[in-house]
Image: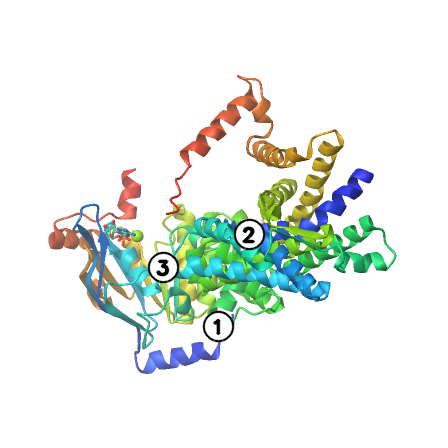
Amino acid sequence: MSILLIGAQVGLIYGPLALGIYFALNILSLPDLTLEGSFGIGGASTAVALVAGLDPATALLLGILGGAIAGLITGLLHVYLRMNVLLAGILMTTAAWSISLAIMGAGNISLLSQATIFTWVEGLGFSGQWAAIIVGALASGLVALVLIWFLHTNYGLSMRASGLNIQTARSFGIRTEARQIVGLIIANGLAAASGALVVQSQGFMDVSIQTGVIVVGLAALMIGMSVFKTPKIIPSILGVLLGILVYRVVVTIALKLGLPPYFVKLVTALVVFGIIAVRANGLGLIAIPGTKAAKKNARERLEYLENDRVVNIT
Amino acid sequence: MRVSASNIWRMIVSSTSPETALEVRDCVKRFKGFGRNEFVIAADSINLAITSGTIVALVGSNGSGKSTLMSMIAGSQLPDSGRIIVAGEDVTEQPSWQRTGKVALVRQNPEHNVFSALTIVENFALAEAGQARRFNLKRAAGQRVRDLARDTLAQFSMGLEDRLDQLAGTLSGGQRQAVSVAMATSRNPALLLLDEHVSALDPTRARVVMEQTEAIVRQRSIATLMVTHDMGHALKHSDRLILMHRGRIAMDLSEKEKAGMGVPDLLARFEKLTGETLPDSAVLARAS
Ligand SMILES: Nc1ncnc2c1ncn2[C@@H]1O[C@H](COP(=O)(O)OP(=O)(O)O)[C@@H](O)[C@H]1O
Ligand SMILES: [Mg+2]
């Protein structure tokens, strides 16, 4: 039980990030790494806003705005400079490190004396742990509901279409480049929301919080997509939120078992590897050579290799 | 079946003064070959005008430039030079997404015509919103779109109207092509382009989809340019037959000129004109 609570406490505030990654990767089919930088920019903006004396909600909104601008720039790089999104995202994330430092004006900012959304909720009579769970659940739930609504509107549907097949979408009258830019703004705004929440929750901002954070969302996405294998929106979004909880519980258990904290990122990577391996290979991965399952797996691997394509991003 | 005001208007107009649905003027399209200064001329100064409400068959060997011509009209490829005018409007500079209200293209591969990961009714909602380019924040796939989808799909008698909430990916190729034609024609385009839209289907299904396509197009009086490898169909079910060869229009037969012509006559004429043989799906089917 306490493991579940710790998982929810630490995990749920990463819900918007995971949904942002879902939005970029699954809805738009854009492998946007800017999300990682936006997480940092969101944290930096919210920290500076809090220090400047703004209230926590406004500080959160400013954080989201920072991420949204980063997404906008990536979208413009993609559409107007005709730059591959993967490449644009790598460059943007590198730049975001400096931008975060420039926003902060220092390597880290302590928020111990500032009110945050979490201290607000604690003021209502909740413990620190429950405040974190409530804020995380509200943020994730709200984002999930809005996304579910949005993706079933005409505009949202046109965004899904743009991520499925650009040529077909355009022949349906959809200006796909506009959808990509708007989509990247949304996805990065969500990543920044998580960054801002994490900073408010831990009470300090350090520029290194962005490093590798995309893998956390990726882990949630992979777990979620393995639970419900469907292109439908509602189960996918619920799956991603479930994924973030499962992932955090796994990490919590690993830490409880005595794993040193610096191994958390290794565990994260292993979780993602494991899920992808199981998803792609099923039980064929551990099948005894010569059995039916092993042969099926071998045939599927051959099919994968035959259909493999190179992607030139330059 | 619903008859919209614009449809009636088009019928009246086309019965009194034949207006032009499509005009292609001196369109040239070159593709870069592998050599340094090597070019493939896919469209070599094409001129073509199509009257509203007529069905024009387009035939020609593989690589003769039929798909390139279709893509240039739909806007997914831009001509190197020349103009494209649809229903009196010069669309040459318009991106494909701006032409959707005027031109509808159904391609050979069903994957390129419908979104498999969306439901049938969601596909219709997109087609509906795209027609007016009104992608707003209202719920897609509402009752109006459902009714429209049900009515248009019922015309194909394939039971598709009862499967509105299934993913389009669960449909067979023929069913997806039927959905594509239903979506394309429900938009009442000034011009419908069919690029071998039944050639990936087995002969029976191909005939069902083809016949129903023609029935809808005739009923709504939509100007249609259709690429086919079925010479018999091209001769019998069109108002005019155009033959392309090496990026040029090599033969243009009016209704009168092709009347009484059989497939062998057509193939012989093509051979005499170009010195090459023309692949006919019926001949190919018999040979295999
Ligand atoms: N995207 C492209 N790049 C290079 N060459 C192309 C491209 N599209 C078509 N071609 C060439 O243009 C010519 C006409 O092709 P196409 O219009 O597809 O013919 P058809 O549809 O009549 O079979 C062919 O020689 C083809 O190889
Ligand atoms: Mg072709």
Foreground: disc 2 or disc 1: 2
| Residue A148, above or below A58 | above
- Residue contact at pointers 3 and 2, CB within 8 angstroms: no
In what element is the residue under mark 3? strand
Q: Which amino acid does label 1 sit on?
A: Ala
Look at mark 3 in the image and give the residue it sits on: B194
Other residues around mark 3 within 10 Å, as few (<14) / some (14–19) / many (≥20)? many
Image mark 3: chain:
B
Q: Which amino acid does label 3 sit on?
A: Leu
Look at mark 2 in the image and give the residue it sits on: A37
- The residue lying at 56 percent from left, 23 percent from top is A293
**Residue B97 in the image: x percent, y percent?**
42, 66
In what element is the residue under mark 1? helix
Q: What residue type is labelled 2?
A: Gly
Look at mark 1 in the image and give the residue it sits on: B132
Q: In which quarter of the image is the C terminus of chain B?
A: top left
**Residue A62 in the image: x percent, y percent?**
63, 64
Q: Nearer the viewer, residue B246 or B7?
A: B246
Q: Earlier in the sequence, mark 1 or mark 3?
A: 1
In what element is the residue under mark 2? helix
Q: Quadrant of residue B232?
A: bottom left
- Find the distance from the CA under tag 3 to the CA under tag 2: 46 Å
- The residue lying at 65 percent from left, 47 percent from top is A240
**Residue B40 in the image: x percent, y percent?**
20, 52
- The residue lying at 34 percent from left, 75 percent from top is B87
Q: Quadrant of residue A78?
A: bottom left
Q: Nearer the viewer, residue B140 or A122?
A: A122
- Residue contact at pointers 1 and 3, CB within 8 angstroms: no
- Find the distance from the CA under tag 2 to the CA under tag 1: 38 Å
- The residue lying at 30 percent from left, 82 percent from top is B17
Foreground: disc 3 or disc 2: 2
